[in-house]
Image (spheres, helix red, strand yellow):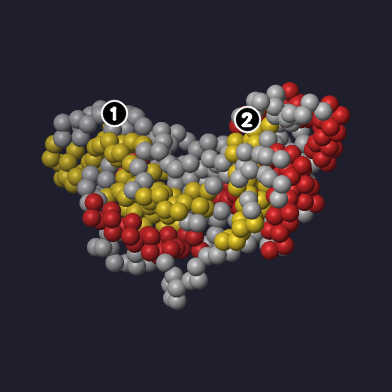
Amino acid sequence: MSSLLRALAILSVMALFQPLSAPAAKAAEVRFGLFSLDDRDPGTIRMDGTLDAGSALNFRRALGAAPDARRLVLDSPGGLVAMGLLIADDVHSRKMATVIPAESTCASACAFVFLAGAERRADGRLGVHQIANEAGDLESAQVSIADIIDVLDRFRTPVPVLTIMFKTPANDMHFFSAEEVARYGINRTGSDISAAAPSAAPEPSPSPPPGAPTGLQAPAAAALASPDLSELEAYASRPTRMALYSGLDFNGQDIEATRVGEASLCARRCLEIGSQCKAFTYNADTRITRGPNCFLKAGSGAMDGNAVAISGLLLHRAESDPAPFSMGVIDPNQGMIEDVDLPGRDLSSKAHPTAKTGPQCRLACVTNDQCQAFTFIKRKKECWLKASIGEPRYKPGMVSGGKTVAHFSPMSVISLE
């Protein structure tokens, strides 16, 4: 796809974020010290900065302005211990969920607030250490420690977290690794807050190219569509960005196929049907005037090169932007050559058992890492996968194609927030 077409595709998809009729009112943000509210997301309060003497009162003010808020999103290096404990107590009594987004930090006194969450999710850095006692007042320090133990016990904080906290010097900080977060059950979801152990990770999909977007597999997508999602699970699964590709086709895992006028409408439809849709592919070939050209998907599926494809992958908060990757492709429009045979060098002594058409044969080669080329015999409906590209020869009634290496990276990552 040319650079001009790429630019037009980006502009087309970005158009989906423009109002369809009258301009929408500008989003309003209200701040109370460290705490901010955004009317686009009334269920969330954000805490950003150092806890000071006015923080607990400002949190109460934020709660008064957003009485239905169920989530507290954290990015703070800590601050006054007393303020952290008071805010944590409010979070606990209201059964709010706490979140540390990727690239954010919640450390020291902020950790008390995080651990108070009825549901907790640490995608960013969670740090703990001993409290500082610069005055050298042992009695005061003991009272503070007793208060911390009492509060954290009410939050059902895992014992290893307490142990690490009190073993880490006040002038140091222990940041929990992803492995420790899982091992100690720091993250938790659902109404049973005693079930701190995280859910088992889903089985990986079969060998995508390194760096390729994996998307969400169909069983996981079905789970996201469930009405039984907890507050935190619903928040974490909400897409925040869209990675947009040209020339890349997400093959399979279709949940809906329809016809629309442009790529932006295909992307909009994916967002409209909810969290079941994780990706889409739009066929931009203007020569095809009938049938579906917008394919909504539960995941990126088996990836394929296609010069007329525009694809989008929805990313949630915990996912990083997709890395560039390379793969062997046989373009269905430009890479299939009629009346050409590639004799010999077959991967098997038998024809492919399920590929009974030329397009199926091409796809069977694309999805087989050992396959470098194919020949399909139309009369016999036989598909022969090849270990390498042999000397081509003219032969009517056959169609062949050979892999080329294509490099893919998102032409744009568009924010949905």
Residue 88 seen = no
Which comes sooner in the sequence, label 1 or label 2? 2
Mark 1 near mark 2, Cβ–Cβ under 8 Å?
Answer: no
Give amino acid for label 1. Ala
- Relative height, residue 331 to residue 200 (above, below): below
Per the image, the residue denoted by label 1 is 387
Q: Which residue type carries mark 2?
A: Phe
- From the viewer's side, name the closer residue of 177 and 105: 105
Q: Where is residue 99 in the image (x, y as percent from the top left)?
A: 64, 46
Q: Position of residue 110 (x, y in %)?
A: 68, 41
Q: How crowded is mark 2: few (under 14 residues within 10 Å), some or many (20 or more)?
A: some
Is residue 124 visible in this depiction of the protein? Answer: yes
How would you rate the neighbour count of disc 1 (Cα within 10 Å): few for under 14, some for 14-19, many for 20 or more?
Answer: some
- Where disc 2 sits, the SS reads strand
**214 up-or-down from 162: above or below:** below
Residue located 53% across and 48% down the image:
316
* Residue where numbered disc 2 is placed: 175
Outermost residue, left side: 394
Query: Residue at the spot x=38%, y=60% of the render?
Result: 14
* Residue drawn 66% across the image and 26% down it: 171
Front residue of 401 and 74: 74
Residue 18 appears left or right of 116: left
Left/right placement of residue 87 relative to residue 374 reads right
Q: Which residue lies furthest to the front in this view?
A: 135
Q: Where is residue 40 in the image (x, y as percent from the top left)?
A: 56, 63
| 1 or 2: mark nearer the eye | 2
Please tell me in which quadrant of the rendered image residue 11 appears: bottom left
387, 318: nearer the viewer:
318
Q: Is 21 in front, or is 81?
A: 81
x and y, in percent, of residue 337 in the image: 19, 45
Residue at x-position 77% and y-position 54%: 94
Q: Total of numbered circles in the picture? A: 2
